[in-house]
Image (spheres, rainbow, N blue to C red):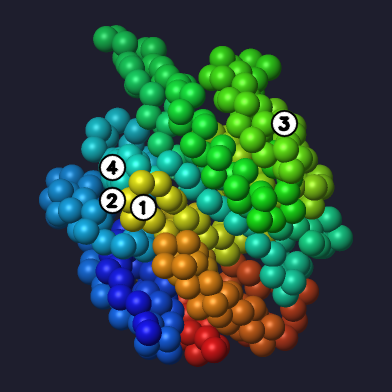
Amino acid sequence: MGISKKILVIPGDGIGREVTLWGRTALERVAKKGGHSFTFREGMMGHEAIEATGSPLPEATISLAKASDAILFGAIGHQKYDQDPTLRVRPEQGLLSIRKELGLYANLRPVRLFDELLGASSIREEILRGTDILFFRELTGDVYFGEKKRSGDGNTASDLMIYHRFEVERIAHKAFEAARTRRKKLCSVDKANVLESSRLWRETVQQVAQSYPDVETEHLFVDNAAMQLVREPRRFDVILTGNLFGDILTDEASQIAGSMGMLASASIGDQAGFYEPIHGSAHDIAGKGIANPIASILSAALMLEISFGLKEESASLIRAVETTLRQGFRTMDIADKHTPNARVLGTDAMGGKVVEAIQ
Ligand code: IPM
Ligand code: MG
Protein backbone atom coordinates (compact mmCIF):
# COMPACT_ATOMS: atom_id res chain seq x y z
CA MET A 1 0.00 0.00 0.00
CA GLY A 2 2.20 2.76 -1.29
CA ILE A 3 1.49 6.43 -0.75
CA SER A 4 0.94 9.10 -3.36
CA LYS A 5 2.70 12.49 -3.11
CA LYS A 6 3.29 15.60 -5.20
CA ILE A 7 6.82 16.96 -4.96
CA LEU A 8 7.97 20.32 -6.29
CA VAL A 9 11.63 20.46 -7.28
CA ILE A 10 13.26 23.90 -7.35
CA PRO A 11 16.86 23.47 -8.55
CA GLY A 12 17.69 27.21 -8.25
CA ASP A 13 21.15 28.61 -8.96
CA GLY A 14 24.77 27.52 -9.12
CA ILE A 15 25.30 23.88 -8.16
CA GLY A 16 21.59 23.62 -7.28
CA ARG A 17 20.61 21.74 -10.40
CA GLU A 18 23.55 19.32 -10.30
CA VAL A 19 22.93 18.23 -6.72
CA THR A 20 19.12 18.30 -6.72
CA LEU A 21 19.07 15.79 -9.53
CA TRP A 22 20.42 13.26 -7.01
CA GLY A 23 18.00 14.12 -4.22
CA ARG A 24 15.25 13.57 -6.73
CA THR A 25 16.74 10.37 -8.13
CA ALA A 26 17.00 8.99 -4.59
CA LEU A 27 13.31 9.76 -4.04
CA GLU A 28 12.43 8.04 -7.32
CA ARG A 29 14.36 4.97 -6.26
CA VAL A 30 12.59 4.86 -2.89
CA ALA A 31 9.20 5.23 -4.61
CA LYS A 32 9.97 2.41 -7.00
CA LYS A 33 11.13 0.05 -4.25
CA GLY A 34 8.26 0.81 -1.89
CA GLY A 35 5.48 0.99 -4.45
CA HIS A 36 4.89 4.69 -3.77
CA SER A 37 3.84 7.18 -6.38
CA PHE A 38 5.78 10.46 -6.30
CA THR A 39 4.96 12.96 -9.03
CA PHE A 40 7.49 15.68 -9.68
CA ARG A 41 6.95 19.22 -10.95
CA GLU A 42 9.66 21.80 -11.43
CA GLY A 43 9.63 25.47 -10.40
CA MET A 44 11.93 28.47 -10.80
CA MET A 45 13.45 30.64 -8.11
CA GLY A 46 16.46 32.93 -7.64
CA HIS A 47 18.79 34.30 -10.30
CA GLU A 48 17.44 31.91 -12.89
CA ALA A 49 13.92 33.20 -12.23
CA ILE A 50 14.99 36.85 -12.32
CA GLU A 51 16.55 36.32 -15.73
CA ALA A 52 13.45 34.57 -17.06
CA THR A 53 10.64 36.55 -15.41
CA GLY A 54 12.10 39.57 -13.61
CA SER A 55 11.07 38.16 -10.24
CA PRO A 56 13.14 35.95 -7.89
CA LEU A 57 9.96 34.13 -6.88
CA PRO A 58 7.40 34.02 -9.73
CA GLU A 59 3.71 33.60 -8.85
CA ALA A 60 3.72 30.31 -10.75
CA THR A 61 6.28 28.86 -8.33
CA ILE A 62 4.24 29.98 -5.31
CA SER A 63 1.08 28.29 -6.65
CA LEU A 64 2.99 25.13 -7.49
CA ALA A 65 4.48 25.11 -3.98
CA LYS A 66 1.09 25.56 -2.36
CA ALA A 67 -0.30 22.67 -4.40
CA SER A 68 2.55 20.32 -3.42
CA ASP A 69 3.07 17.97 -0.49
CA ALA A 70 6.77 18.81 -0.19
CA ILE A 71 9.46 20.85 -1.90
CA LEU A 72 13.03 19.87 -2.71
CA PHE A 73 15.22 22.91 -3.21
CA GLY A 74 18.80 23.27 -4.42
CA ALA A 75 20.60 26.57 -3.87
CA ILE A 76 20.27 30.28 -4.47
CA GLY A 77 22.59 33.19 -5.28
CA HIS A 78 24.85 34.56 -7.99
CA GLN A 79 28.20 36.33 -7.98
CA LYS A 80 26.81 39.25 -9.93
CA TYR A 81 24.76 40.29 -6.87
CA ASP A 82 27.45 39.48 -4.33
CA GLN A 83 29.78 41.90 -6.07
CA ASP A 84 27.14 44.61 -6.48
CA PRO A 85 25.23 45.37 -3.26
CA THR A 86 23.29 48.16 -5.00
CA LEU A 87 21.14 45.79 -7.08
CA ARG A 88 17.56 45.99 -5.79
CA VAL A 89 16.16 42.72 -7.08
CA ARG A 90 18.19 39.87 -5.57
CA PRO A 91 18.00 36.06 -5.82
CA GLU A 92 17.94 35.55 -2.03
CA GLN A 93 14.64 37.47 -1.87
CA GLY A 94 13.09 34.44 -3.57
CA LEU A 95 14.13 32.10 -0.78
CA LEU A 96 13.13 34.52 1.97
CA SER A 97 9.73 35.14 0.34
CA ILE A 98 8.91 31.48 -0.10
CA ARG A 99 9.81 30.83 3.57
CA LYS A 100 7.38 33.60 4.53
CA GLU A 101 4.67 32.62 2.00
CA LEU A 102 4.63 29.01 3.19
CA GLY A 103 4.96 29.95 6.88
CA LEU A 104 8.12 27.84 7.23
CA TYR A 105 9.02 29.09 10.68
CA ALA A 106 11.09 26.15 11.92
CA ASN A 107 14.33 25.22 10.22
CA LEU A 108 15.72 21.88 11.40
CA ARG A 109 19.40 21.33 10.73
CA PRO A 110 20.72 18.01 12.01
CA VAL A 111 24.48 17.81 12.41
CA ARG A 112 25.02 14.15 11.75
CA LEU A 113 28.49 12.73 11.86
CA PHE A 114 29.51 9.86 9.65
CA ASP A 115 32.42 7.96 11.27
CA GLU A 116 34.14 7.70 7.91
CA LEU A 117 34.43 11.48 7.73
CA LEU A 118 35.94 12.10 11.16
CA GLY A 119 39.23 12.88 9.46
CA ALA A 120 37.72 15.28 6.93
CA SER A 121 36.90 17.95 9.48
CA SER A 122 39.20 20.78 10.47
CA ILE A 123 38.40 19.83 14.08
CA ARG A 124 40.25 17.00 15.84
CA GLU A 125 38.66 13.57 15.76
CA GLU A 126 38.62 13.02 19.54
CA ILE A 127 36.64 16.23 19.97
CA LEU A 128 34.13 15.34 17.29
CA ARG A 129 33.43 11.68 17.97
CA GLY A 130 29.89 11.05 19.18
CA THR A 131 28.54 14.50 18.28
CA ASP A 132 24.85 14.57 17.37
CA ILE A 133 23.16 17.97 17.33
CA LEU A 134 19.77 19.06 16.06
CA PHE A 135 19.43 22.78 15.42
CA PHE A 136 16.06 24.52 15.48
CA ARG A 137 16.64 27.82 13.72
CA GLU A 138 13.69 30.25 13.67
CA LEU A 139 13.17 31.11 10.01
CA THR A 140 10.51 33.76 9.41
CA GLY A 141 11.33 36.49 11.93
CA ASP A 142 14.31 38.40 13.35
CA VAL A 143 16.48 40.93 11.57
CA TYR A 144 15.86 39.01 8.33
CA PHE A 145 12.29 40.27 8.13
CA GLY A 146 12.35 43.42 10.29
CA GLU A 147 11.99 46.82 8.65
CA LYS A 148 14.96 47.86 6.50
CA LYS A 149 15.85 51.52 6.05
CA ARG A 150 18.33 53.68 4.23
CA SER A 151 18.55 57.43 4.87
CA GLY A 152 17.92 59.89 2.06
CA ASP A 153 21.63 60.71 1.72
CA GLY A 154 22.39 56.99 1.61
CA ASN A 155 24.86 57.19 4.49
CA THR A 156 22.89 55.47 7.22
CA ALA A 157 21.18 52.08 7.15
CA SER A 158 19.35 49.88 9.64
CA ASP A 159 17.66 46.49 9.88
CA LEU A 160 15.20 45.98 12.68
CA MET A 161 15.79 42.92 14.87
CA ILE A 162 12.29 42.02 16.00
CA TYR A 163 10.55 39.02 17.58
CA HIS A 164 6.97 38.51 18.70
CA ARG A 165 6.25 36.22 21.64
CA PHE A 166 4.14 33.82 19.53
CA GLU A 167 7.01 33.35 17.08
CA VAL A 168 9.33 32.24 19.88
CA GLU A 169 6.65 30.08 21.51
CA ARG A 170 5.77 28.01 18.47
CA ILE A 171 9.35 27.11 17.57
CA ALA A 172 10.27 26.54 21.21
CA HIS A 173 7.48 23.95 21.49
CA LYS A 174 8.75 22.17 18.38
CA ALA A 175 12.30 22.11 19.75
CA PHE A 176 11.27 20.84 23.19
CA GLU A 177 9.13 18.13 21.61
CA ALA A 178 12.12 17.01 19.53
CA ALA A 179 14.40 17.07 22.60
CA ARG A 180 11.98 14.67 24.30
CA THR A 181 12.57 12.11 21.57
CA ARG A 182 16.37 12.51 21.85
CA ARG A 183 18.73 13.00 24.82
CA LYS A 184 16.32 15.44 26.54
CA LYS A 185 18.66 18.41 26.53
CA LEU A 186 17.89 21.78 25.04
CA CYS A 187 20.20 24.76 24.72
CA SER A 188 18.62 28.07 23.78
CA VAL A 189 21.01 30.58 22.23
CA ASP A 190 20.50 34.35 22.34
CA LYS A 191 22.26 37.61 23.19
CA ALA A 192 20.08 38.55 26.15
CA ASN A 193 22.90 40.46 27.84
CA VAL A 194 22.61 43.11 25.11
CA LEU A 195 19.48 42.75 22.99
CA GLU A 196 15.88 43.39 24.06
CA SER A 197 14.58 40.96 21.42
CA SER A 198 16.84 38.32 23.01
CA ARG A 199 15.44 39.09 26.47
CA LEU A 200 11.95 38.41 25.11
CA TRP A 201 13.35 35.24 23.51
CA ARG A 202 14.87 34.00 26.79
CA GLU A 203 11.83 34.89 28.89
CA THR A 204 9.55 33.05 26.46
CA VAL A 205 11.77 29.96 26.27
CA GLN A 206 11.91 29.86 30.08
CA GLN A 207 8.10 29.88 30.20
CA VAL A 208 7.72 27.20 27.54
CA ALA A 209 10.33 25.09 29.36
CA GLN A 210 7.97 24.77 32.32
CA SER A 211 5.77 22.47 30.23
CA TYR A 212 8.75 20.18 29.61
CA PRO A 213 10.18 19.44 33.08
CA ASP A 214 11.75 16.25 31.72
CA VAL A 215 13.99 18.27 29.38
CA GLU A 216 17.14 19.83 30.82
CA THR A 217 17.24 23.43 29.57
CA GLU A 218 20.18 25.83 29.42
CA HIS A 219 20.63 29.29 27.95
CA LEU A 220 23.85 30.45 26.30
CA PHE A 221 24.88 33.75 24.78
CA VAL A 222 25.64 33.35 21.11
CA ASP A 223 29.31 34.28 21.39
CA ASN A 224 29.83 31.63 24.05
CA ALA A 225 27.78 29.08 22.08
CA ALA A 226 29.95 29.66 18.99
CA MET A 227 33.01 28.87 21.08
CA GLN A 228 31.50 25.82 22.85
CA LEU A 229 30.47 24.34 19.51
CA VAL A 230 34.06 23.76 18.48
CA ARG A 231 35.41 23.26 22.01
CA GLU A 232 33.02 20.51 23.09
CA PRO A 233 30.34 19.80 20.45
CA ARG A 234 29.22 16.62 22.26
CA ARG A 235 27.67 18.64 25.08
CA PHE A 236 24.84 19.73 22.77
CA ASP A 237 21.65 17.87 21.91
CA VAL A 238 18.97 20.28 20.63
CA ILE A 239 20.02 23.89 20.00
CA LEU A 240 17.19 26.41 19.68
CA THR A 241 18.00 29.84 18.29
CA GLY A 242 16.86 32.80 16.19
CA ASN A 243 17.18 33.34 12.48
CA LEU A 244 20.49 35.22 12.27
CA PHE A 245 22.33 33.37 15.03
CA GLY A 246 21.08 30.08 13.58
CA ASP A 247 22.35 30.98 10.13
CA ILE A 248 25.83 31.65 11.44
CA LEU A 249 26.06 28.79 13.96
CA THR A 250 24.92 26.14 11.48
CA ASP A 251 27.62 27.07 8.96
CA GLU A 252 30.10 26.75 11.81
CA ALA A 253 28.58 23.41 12.83
CA SER A 254 28.86 22.07 9.29
CA GLN A 255 32.59 21.74 9.93
CA ILE A 256 31.74 19.14 12.55
CA ALA A 257 30.18 17.04 9.81
CA GLY A 258 33.28 17.52 7.67
CA SER A 259 31.86 19.77 4.97
CA MET A 260 29.01 22.10 4.08
CA GLY A 261 28.30 19.52 1.40
CA MET A 262 27.03 17.08 4.04
CA LEU A 263 24.35 19.09 5.85
CA ALA A 264 20.67 18.90 5.00
CA SER A 265 17.80 20.92 6.37
CA ALA A 266 14.05 20.78 6.73
CA SER A 267 11.89 23.88 6.99
CA ILE A 268 8.49 23.23 8.40
CA GLY A 269 5.46 25.28 9.31
CA ASP A 270 1.84 25.52 8.36
CA GLN A 271 2.00 24.08 4.84
CA ALA A 272 4.22 21.87 2.68
CA GLY A 273 7.68 21.14 4.11
CA PHE A 274 10.69 22.58 2.31
CA TYR A 275 13.92 20.59 2.11
CA GLU A 276 17.31 21.92 1.14
CA PRO A 277 21.05 21.50 1.62
CA ILE A 278 22.50 24.20 3.85
CA HIS A 279 25.26 24.89 1.35
CA GLY A 280 24.85 27.72 -1.12
CA SER A 281 25.12 28.02 -4.87
CA ALA A 282 28.96 27.63 -4.82
CA HIS A 283 29.57 29.40 -8.11
CA ASP A 284 33.27 28.64 -7.99
CA ILE A 285 32.50 24.98 -8.70
CA ALA A 286 29.15 25.26 -10.51
CA GLY A 287 28.94 23.39 -13.79
CA LYS A 288 32.14 21.47 -13.11
CA GLY A 289 30.37 18.31 -11.96
CA ILE A 290 32.33 18.08 -8.71
CA ALA A 291 29.77 19.27 -6.14
CA ASN A 292 28.79 16.90 -3.33
CA PRO A 293 25.24 15.54 -3.87
CA ILE A 294 24.99 14.08 -0.34
CA ALA A 295 23.33 17.10 1.31
CA SER A 296 20.56 16.95 -1.30
CA ILE A 297 20.13 13.20 -0.77
CA LEU A 298 20.00 13.73 3.00
CA SER A 299 17.44 16.51 2.44
CA ALA A 300 15.34 13.96 0.56
CA ALA A 301 15.72 11.64 3.57
CA LEU A 302 14.37 14.37 5.84
CA MET A 303 11.41 14.84 3.48
CA LEU A 304 10.58 11.12 3.61
CA GLU A 305 10.60 11.13 7.39
CA ILE A 306 9.06 14.48 8.29
CA SER A 307 6.59 15.20 5.49
CA PHE A 308 5.66 11.65 4.46
CA GLY A 309 6.20 9.67 7.69
CA LEU A 310 8.33 7.12 5.78
CA LYS A 311 10.85 6.48 8.57
CA GLU A 312 12.26 3.24 7.21
CA GLU A 313 12.73 4.66 3.71
CA SER A 314 14.39 7.72 5.19
CA ALA A 315 16.79 5.55 7.18
CA SER A 316 17.58 3.58 4.02
CA LEU A 317 18.92 6.75 2.36
CA ILE A 318 21.13 7.53 5.34
CA ARG A 319 22.44 3.96 5.33
CA ALA A 320 23.14 4.22 1.59
CA VAL A 321 25.27 7.32 2.22
CA GLU A 322 27.07 5.45 5.00
CA THR A 323 27.72 2.44 2.78
CA THR A 324 29.09 4.60 -0.01
CA LEU A 325 31.46 6.41 2.34
CA ARG A 326 32.55 3.11 3.87
CA GLN A 327 33.40 1.85 0.38
CA GLY A 328 35.86 4.72 0.21
CA PHE A 329 34.04 6.93 -2.26
CA ARG A 330 34.36 10.68 -1.70
CA THR A 331 33.61 13.92 -3.46
CA MET A 332 36.38 16.49 -3.49
CA ASP A 333 35.15 18.45 -0.47
CA ILE A 334 35.30 15.42 1.84
CA ALA A 335 38.37 13.71 0.44
CA ASP A 336 41.24 14.03 2.90
CA LYS A 337 44.69 12.79 3.63
CA HIS A 338 43.40 10.32 6.24
CA THR A 339 41.73 8.15 3.64
CA PRO A 340 44.58 7.39 1.25
CA ASN A 341 42.54 4.77 -0.56
CA ALA A 342 39.63 7.10 -1.14
CA ARG A 343 38.31 7.29 -4.66
CA VAL A 344 37.39 10.83 -5.48
CA LEU A 345 34.28 10.99 -7.63
CA GLY A 346 32.33 13.73 -9.37
CA THR A 347 28.72 14.62 -8.57
CA ASP A 348 27.04 12.12 -10.88
CA ALA A 349 29.30 9.18 -10.05
CA MET A 350 28.88 9.83 -6.32
CA GLY A 351 25.10 10.30 -6.61
CA GLY A 352 24.93 7.11 -8.66
CA LYS A 353 26.85 5.13 -6.01
CA VAL A 354 24.55 6.30 -3.22
CA VAL A 355 21.37 5.58 -5.19
CA GLU A 356 22.70 2.15 -6.11
CA ALA A 357 23.29 1.43 -2.40
CA ILE A 358 19.68 2.15 -1.38
CA GLN A 359 18.26 -1.11 0.02
C1 IPM B 1 20.76 29.63 4.56
C2 IPM B 1 21.28 30.67 3.62
C3 IPM B 1 20.22 31.75 3.42
C4 IPM B 1 19.95 32.39 4.76
C5 IPM B 1 20.59 32.81 2.36
C6 IPM B 1 20.93 32.20 1.04
C7 IPM B 1 19.50 33.84 2.22
O1 IPM B 1 22.49 31.20 4.07
O2 IPM B 1 19.70 29.04 4.27
O3 IPM B 1 21.41 29.38 5.57
O4 IPM B 1 20.66 33.32 5.18
O5 IPM B 1 19.00 31.98 5.41
MG1 MG C 1 23.28 30.21 5.74
Question: Is disc 4 in contact with disc 1, using a CB cutoff of under 8 Å?
Answer: no
**Dot label at residue 220:** 3
Q: Which element type, helix, strand or loop, lies under badge 3?
A: strand
**Residue nearer the viewer, 255 or 173:** 173
Question: Is disc 2 in contact with disc 1, using a CB cutoff of under 8 Å?
Answer: yes
Compared to residue 346, the image places residue 177 above or below, namely above
Whichever of callouts 4 and 3 sits on the residue coming sooner in the sequence is: 4
Q: Which residue is mark 4?
A: 101
Q: Which element type, helix, strand or loop, lies under badge 1?
A: loop
| Neighbour tally class for label 1: few under 14, some 14-19, many 20 plus, Cα within 10 Å | many
Q: Amino acid at mark 4?
A: Glu
Residue 109 visible within the image: yes
Q: Return the x and y of residue 233 as percentages of the image width and height.
A: 77, 50
Question: Is disc 4 in contact with disc 3, using a CB cutoff of under 8 Å?
Answer: no
| Neighbour tally class for label 4: few under 14, some 14-19, many 20 plus, Cα within 10 Å | some
**Residue nearer the viewer, 213 or 338:** 213
**Spatial separation of the CA atoms under disc 1 and disc 3:** 31 Å
Q: Return the x and y of residue 173 as percentages of the image width and height.
A: 55, 40
Q: Which residue is mark 1?
A: 76
